[in-house]
Image (tube, grey):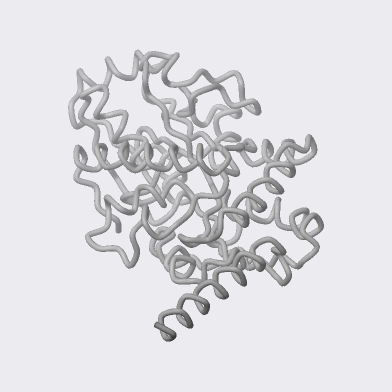
Amino acid sequence: MRKRLRLALSFAGLFLAAAASAQSYPTKAIRVVVAFAPGGIADFAARSVSQKLSENLGVPVVIENRPGAGGVIGSELVAKAAPDGYTVLVTSISHTINLSVNKSMPFDTRRDFAPVMLIADASNILVVHPSVPVTSVKELIEFARARPGRLAYASSGSGTSVHLSAELFKAMTHVDLLHVPYKGGGPAVADLVSGQVQLMFATLPTVLEHVRTGRLRGLGVTGGRRFTGASEFPTIAEAGLPGYELSGWSGMFAPANTPKVVIDRLAGETAKILREPGLRERFLALGAEPAVKMPDEFAAFVDSEIAKWKKVVEFSGARAD
């Protein structure tokens, strides 16, 4: 009886200590693990909020890039970290794609993470080489249907959002396009500009200058609304394919079982930063926009993305490189 009482008191003490620690959060440096190399949207998103987050929380916020395996390496590190709010992850749409394109994963995407905040929303853009005689999404669909398997599209690698943007397009239009994967967006865009391949669902920053100088032709953006920094391009949905939507988003996650009070503090402070006007201009320059989805809304969004990409991967048979 006394032993059970001592155990109960011990557990109660641990619970109260954890609760007190969560209420006083943060008291030391926060490590933000970015699952990609410096220079991309996820890295930019993390760095854009980290300095202000440090000021608002009164502790250092340190960025640590852990690229590799389409975001899996950095994500695994955070999945296995202590659930105390001092190690968090910033990753991208690949977080919800990897589950379907990899044969095995070192973590459970749903079980091992607590969604904190959607940070950035970035559309891809459907572009064609000028030799393709189309000026709209509708015309491209008709042109491709008349030439099954004869149009090649480039991607930055199998299983990436650039690849699956095209596979979603194929699934919804029933057109037959040839996939040509590259080791990164740079080589893919170079071959597109030279006419080696005919089209691509590219990230906006990599092709926008080529479009505006006439080396490529833009037909539509993949997001649910027009991109503010290039509003001359319609969405693919409004340009001829209703229901089509893809956002190359970036967001913040904590390890599962992180206390709710900690999640809410991180989310609340990050949301304040994302609503600052000056930050929006910096995002637009890179082809993205700040995006705010609080934890519950972000969790529902992540679940919907996992289900969506599972269907697209099953249709396409895509696998990670």
Q: Residue at x 77, y 38 (%)?
A: 276
Position of 85 relative to 208 (above/below): below
Q: Quadrant of the C terminus?
A: bottom left
Position of 38 relative to 215 (above/below): below
**Can residue 78 be seen here?**
yes
Q: Residue at x 46, y 60 (%)?
A: 256
* Left or right side of 165 for 219: right
Spot occupied by residue 2 in the image (x, y as percentages of width and height):
44, 85
Q: Quadrant of the N terminus?
A: bottom left
* Left or right side of 113 for 173: left
Q: Nearer the viewer, residue 119 or 285?
A: 119
Spot occupied by residue 145 in the image (x, y as percentages of width and height):
21, 20
Spot occupied by residue 43 in the image (x, y as percentages of width and height):
60, 56
**Can residue 217 be seen here?**
no
- Give residue 56's quadrant in the image: bottom right
- Give residue 244's quadrant in the image: top left
Q: Nearer the viewer, residue 116 or 317?
A: 116
Q: Nearer the viewer, residue 136 or 1?
A: 1
Extreme-front residue of the structure: 1
* Left or right side of 275 for 187: left
